């Protein structure tokens, strides 16, 4: 069966299909759909999860072998199969997927995520088998006409109640990259809190022409561009930006880098990890630099440091908020000024 993105939430409240295929070139919506399916699977007893990242050397026989190898402590398993954008299962993969459906693995759920499917792929035997046995969710970009509805839904998800003028203003500012748009909405929630939000609050909180930007700050830290990073820190502080927004951006990046560094420690190449995490091309250089500078232990240590900074920002510990933020940024850039227990 075919599903639209807006139908997924209601569908997942029912018994799950044995297989789900999520395809499309809009990474934010694709990731969100996969996350919803994984969470629904856990809620319905799929307590074991195994990931498969398809590359040129992938052994498709792993699928059936994994389906037949349940843990002693799990009754059901979620198999998370990820193909990078532009990669098709090919003949071996198509054969393996068809065989998986024919085997009727009742104790496993197969979640497949991949890029946009062309007409030829949708005519393939493996696609028809997946469509018949499970659910196919094709993700389409959000066009300008649908952007206000998308923004309103994401704000309501965060507990905000925007008026029409606020939604329209945000749609004009944020049209395009949904991931960046969602990040802006999270920043707006941190500044305005939950509840009603009007256009005046949006105008005060969101600027599309700000001289200094928290995301530029993150990239400067990852690249080790210390002087540039400090200039951005000073600019953000001078513009009166709330320190909690800077901490949010740094912590979010540190958490992501920690996960990627763990993957590298398991023997995956940096390029493979960038693909697995769907890092945008314009961010590959700073992320790669950060992975080469710090191992997983250091990134995890920075998470503890970020938690300490949060206590300072909330008045639960002594310290100067901006000085603590600079310390954290310098640590990301490879400069450690003061000895800390998490260093």
Image (tube, grey):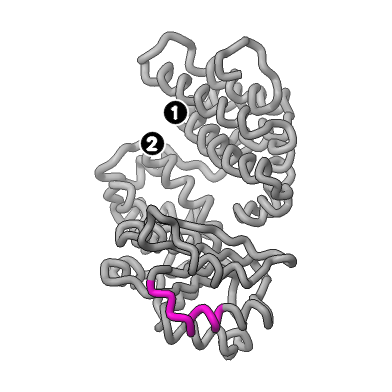
Q: Which residue matches tag 1?
A: 244
- Membership of 85 in magenta stretch: no
Q: Mainly helix, strand or loop, the magenta region?
A: helix
For the point 62% across and 10% down, the residue is 339
In the displayed structure image, the side of residue 57 where residue 37 appears, left or right? left
For the point 69% across and 36% down, the residue is 290
Dot 1 alpha-carbon crowd within 10 angstroms: few under 14, some 14 to 19, many 20 or more: some
Foreground residue, 105 or 214?
105
- Membership of 99 in magenta stretch: yes
In the displayed structure image, the side of residue 227 where residue 83 appears, left or right? left
Of the 4 image quadrants, the one containing the N terminus is bottom left
Q: Which residue matches tag 2?
A: 190
- Can you give x and y, in whole percent of width and height, for residue 21 in the image? 49, 73
For the point 56% across and 78% down, the residue is 97
Asked if labels 2 and 1 touch by Cβ distance under 8 angstroms, the answer is: yes
- Can you give x and y, in whole percent of width and height, for residue 305 in the image? 52, 22
Q: Which residues are magenta?
A: 97-106
């Amino acid at each position: 069966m075919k599903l639209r993105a807006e139908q997924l939430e209601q569908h997942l409240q029912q018994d799950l299909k044995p297989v789900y295929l999520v395809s499309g070139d809009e990474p934010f919506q694709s990731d969100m759909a996969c996350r919803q399916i994984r969470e629904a699977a856990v809620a319905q007893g799929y307590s074991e999860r195994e990931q498969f990242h398809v590359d040129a050397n992938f052994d498709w026989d792993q699928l059936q072998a994994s389906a037949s190898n349940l843990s002693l402590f799990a009754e059901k398993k979620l198999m998370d199969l990820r193909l990078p954008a532009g990669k098709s299962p090919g003949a071996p993969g198509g054969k393996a997927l068809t065989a998986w459906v024919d085997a009727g693995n009742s104790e496993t759920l197969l979640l497949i995520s991949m890029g946009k499917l062309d007409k030829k792929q949708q005519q393939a035997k493996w696609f028809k088998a997946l469509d018949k046995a499970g659910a196919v969710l094709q993700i389409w970009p959000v066009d300008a006409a649908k952007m206000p509805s998308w923004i309103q839904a994401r704000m309501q998800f965060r507990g905000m109640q925007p008026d029409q003028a606020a939604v329209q203003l945000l749609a004009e500012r944020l049209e395009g990259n949904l991931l960046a748009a969602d990040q802006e909405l999270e920043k707006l929630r941190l500044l305005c809190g939950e509840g009603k939000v009007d256009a005046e609050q949006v105008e005060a909180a969101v600027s599309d022409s700000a001289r200094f930007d928290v995301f530029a700050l993150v990239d400067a830290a990852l690249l080790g561009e210390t002087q540039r990073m400090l200039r951005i820190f000073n600019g953000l502080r001078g513009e009166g930006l709330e320190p909690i927004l800077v901490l949010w951006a740094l912590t979010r990046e540190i958490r992501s880098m920690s996960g990627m560094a763990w993957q590298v420690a398991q023997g995956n190449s940096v390029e493979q990890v960038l693909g697995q995490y769907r890092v945008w091309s314009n961010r590959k250089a700073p992320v790669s630099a950060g992975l080469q500078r710090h191992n997983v232990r250091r990134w995890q240590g920075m998470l503890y440091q970020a938690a300490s900074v949060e206590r300072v920002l909330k008045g639960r510990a002594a310290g100067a908020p901006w000085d603590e933020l600079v310390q954290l940024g310098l640590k990301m850039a490879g400069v450690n000024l003061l000895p800390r227990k998490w260093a």
